[in-house]
Amino acid sequence: MGLAANVTLSLSLAGSPTPAIQWSRNGNPIAGATNATLSFTGISAAQAGTCTATAFNFLGAVSLQLIVLTGSAIPAITAQPASQTVGGTQAISA
């Protein structure tokens, strides 16, 4: 997945009593991420990691690892190639 991608994760769950949800990334709870849907806008390298959803009620909890965000960088040319002469008479320009 390239940088600046948008990702939405969602799950469907059932239980009685109705379970609560907490999303986490790399084992750390994501503040305010307590809905069945979690969205990331403009993925960056800082957001890379494993996302997990945990559903729980007073009877217990179950966790599901849904995705690993890689935050890979798109290749870029950082310097233009220099002009060169090939075979003594033909110039190649960048």
Image: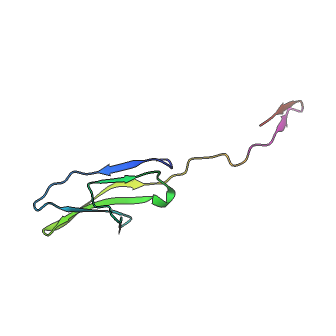
Q: Quadrant of the C terminus?
A: top right
Q: Is residue 29 left or right of residue 76?
A: left
Q: Which residues are magenta?
A: 80-88
Residue 30 falls in image quadrant: bottom left
Q: Is residue 93 left or right of residue 58?
A: right
Residue 83 belongs to the span the image colors magenta: yes
Q: Residue at x 51, y 52 (%)?
A: 72
Q: Is residue 36 left or right of residue 92?
A: left
Pick the residue in front: 30 or 92.
30
Q: Residue at x 45, y 58 (%)?
A: 48
Q: Is residue 76 left or right of residue 93?
A: left
Q: Residue at x 84, y 32 (%)?
A: 91
Residue 50 falls in image quadrant: bottom left
Residue 85 belongs to the span the image colors magenta: yes
Pick the residue in front: 36 or 88.
36
- From this view, report whether residue 1 is shown above or below residue 94: below
